[in-house]
Amino acid sequence: MRCNGWRETGTSIRWCWDSLFLMRWMPQLLRHNALLVVLVVLQSCVSTPPENWPETLPDRQLFVAAYQADARNQQEQNRAEYLDWILNFYQGSLLYSTGWQDIERLVLERTAPSDRPMITAELNRLGFAIASEWAKSNDVRVLDNRLLSLWGYLLQIAPDSAGQTRTIGVIAEDIAGLLSRRLAPDTVNESRYEALLGIELFEGF
């Protein structure tokens, strides 16, 4: 089971998307925990409706188009559910408050001021690529929670603007490879990025 937010790993802080995993499997878990039932009901009462799409997110129609482009996912998931997961990806939720927008802010704290517009645009494109696939049904999506955890960690440890650009580019290339089935998910691991980026990672992804 995963946790959401940051956790200490030695002297580094590791990004963890475990809460999103918990949320996606909540129906099974709720059978055994009445308290969680109450919390999920509360969450649904305050969730942002698609009609009030946040201005800080990519345009809603881009995600609607991504949903409509996947006929198989439409058989497994309705559009409202898909858009709700998009919002959870970016904003977090009542239960788990950390989302992609938080990781963007943390990355930009290490970016040179003159490079922030460029890195912001790169992070926006990367976030859209991840969100539009991750938000699909578990039975359909290619990008899973393990990959999100690994990529979030890579972005967090990039030391400067040049490292951030390189890391974003490598992740974007791997997303393209995964979506085209040219790259097997089990080959996208810490060893791969240690070789590609010349870094050392903690094991466990």
Image: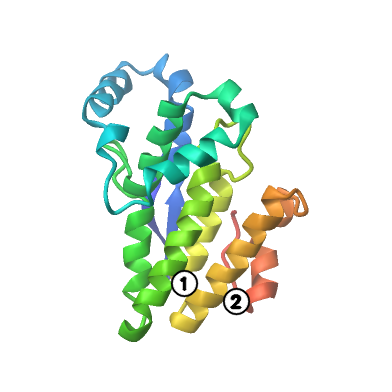
Q: Amino acid at mark 1?
A: Ile
Q: Is residue 203 left or right of residue 120?
A: right
- In the image, residue 23 lies at what x, y percent? 42, 32
Choose between 130 and 33: the one closer to the eye.
130
Q: Nearer the viewer, residue 1 or 187?
A: 187
Residue at 35%, 77% in the rendered image: 116
Q: How many marks?
A: 2
In percent of the image, x 30 and y 39: which residue is there? 93
Residue, x 60% and y 73% (percent of image)? 200
When asked about the image quadrant of residue 85, the answer is top left
**Disc 1 marks which residue?**
157
Amino acid residing under circle 2: Ile
Report if residue 18 is visible in the image.
no
The answer to whether mark 1 and mark 2 are in CB contact below 8 A is yes
How far separated are the C-alphas under marks 1 and 2? 10 Å
Q: Could you tell whether 188 is left or right of 52 in the image?
A: right
**Disc 1 on helix, strand or loop?**
helix
- Residue 32 vertical position relative to residue 92 in the rendered view, above or below: above
Task: Classify 180 as above or below 136.
Answer: below
Query: Is the residue 105 above or below the residue 51 in the image?
Result: below
**Residue 140: where, in percent of width, then height?**
63, 33
153 displayed left or right of 72: left
> Is residue 130 among what the camera can see?
yes
Which residue carries the number 2 mark?
A: 199
Nearer to us in this view, 14 or 66: 66
